[in-house]
Image (cartoon, grey):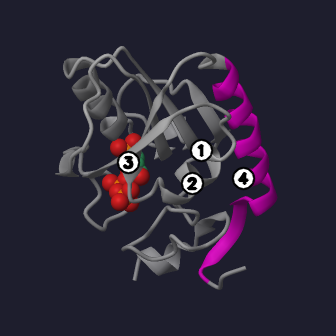
């Protein structure tokens, strides 16, 4: 385990099992459809990669870069689109792929944007859900694991752009971000 991590919250094996389970569920729920997976960069990258391989459907993948943290440990509340989609979502069944839903500011903003752009349906698959962090009522449709209110990094999640490459999700030692 990395020296800056106090506890592993979601192990590599558990992440693998989550991808298999959610992949099977999405395959069933979207049978006969041609969904568009939209990953919200950068945190989504490992999950998008592993989850998409477990979905047995004809599907497309696209990315959008949004940010609300600006390097800190809590959401700023403002969601910035840094890079937009390169594909139309009009009349598409969109599945947004996220690493974590915390305050839900990011996801609710993007869902509203996609509906405004004419998506046929918009649902969310998130590896982690942290309901204790919510500042508004929102529940994602597909959740890998519900976690307590702790600052987590790894498997796409960062602190100041570091730790995204850890193969598991772990709790960052407070002394690291309180420095
Ligand atoms: C993180 C994460 C989600 C969002 C969740 O992204 O990937 O998109 O914050 O937080 P919220 O529910 O409070 O809005 P971030 O803005 O840190 O960008 P990143 O994916 O590039 O790390």
* Image mark for residue 52: 1
> At which x and y percent is residue 16?
75, 52
* In the image, residue 5 lies in the stretch drawn in magenta: yes
Using the image, determine if residue 94 lies above or below residue 32. Answer: below
Provide the residue designation for mark 2.
49
Q: Which residues are magenta?
A: 4-28
Total of numbered circles in the picture? Answer: 4
Q: Are marks 2 and 4 in contact (CB under 8 Å)?
A: no
Q: Are marks 3 and 1 in contact (CB under 8 Å)?
A: no
Q: Secondary structure at mark 4?
A: helix
Provide the residue designation for mark 3.
40
The main secondary structure of the magenta stretch is helix
98 and 176: which one is in front?
A: 98
Which numbered disc, 1 or 4, marks the residue closer to the eye?
A: 1
Quadrant of the frame with the N terminus: bottom right
The structure residue drawn at horizontal position 39% and vertical position 73%, both measured from the top left corner, is 161
> At which x and y percent is residue 74?
35, 55
Which numbered disc, 2 or 3, marks the residue closer to the eye?
A: 2
Report whether the residue tagged 3 is closer than 8 Å to ligand 1. yes
* Image mark for residue 15: 4
Position of residue 101 in the picture relative to residue 72 (left or right): right
Toward which corner of the image does residue 77 lie, by quadrant?
top left
Q: CA distance from mark 1 to mark 2?
A: 6 Å
Report whether the residue tagged 2 is closer than 8 Å to ligand 1. no
Q: Secondary structure at mark 1?
A: helix
* In the image, residue 25 lies in the stretch drawn in magenta: yes
């Amino acid at each position: 385990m990395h020296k800056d991590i106090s506890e592993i919250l979601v192990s590599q094996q558990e992440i693998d099992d989550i991808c298999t389970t959610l992949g099977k569920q999405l395959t069933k729920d979207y049978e006969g459809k041609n969904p568009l997976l939209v990953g919200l960069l950068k945190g989504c990258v490992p999950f998008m990669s592993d989850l998409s391989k477990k979905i047995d459907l004809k599907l497309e993948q696209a990315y959008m870069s949004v940010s609300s943290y600006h390097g800190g440990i809590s959401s700023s509340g403002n969601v910035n689109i840094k890079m937009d989609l390169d594909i139309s979502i009009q009349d598409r069944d969109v599945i947004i792929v996220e690493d974590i839903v915390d305050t839900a500011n990011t996801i609710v903003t993007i869902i509203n944007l996609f509906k405004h752009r004419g998506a046929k349906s918009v649902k969310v698959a998130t590896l982690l859900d942290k309901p204790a962090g919510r500042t508004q009522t929102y529940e994602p449709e597909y959740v890998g694991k519900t976690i307590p209110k702790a600052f987590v990094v790894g498997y796409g999640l960062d602190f100041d752009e570091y730790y995204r490459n850890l193969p598991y999700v772990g709790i960052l030692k407070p002394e690291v971000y309180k420095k």
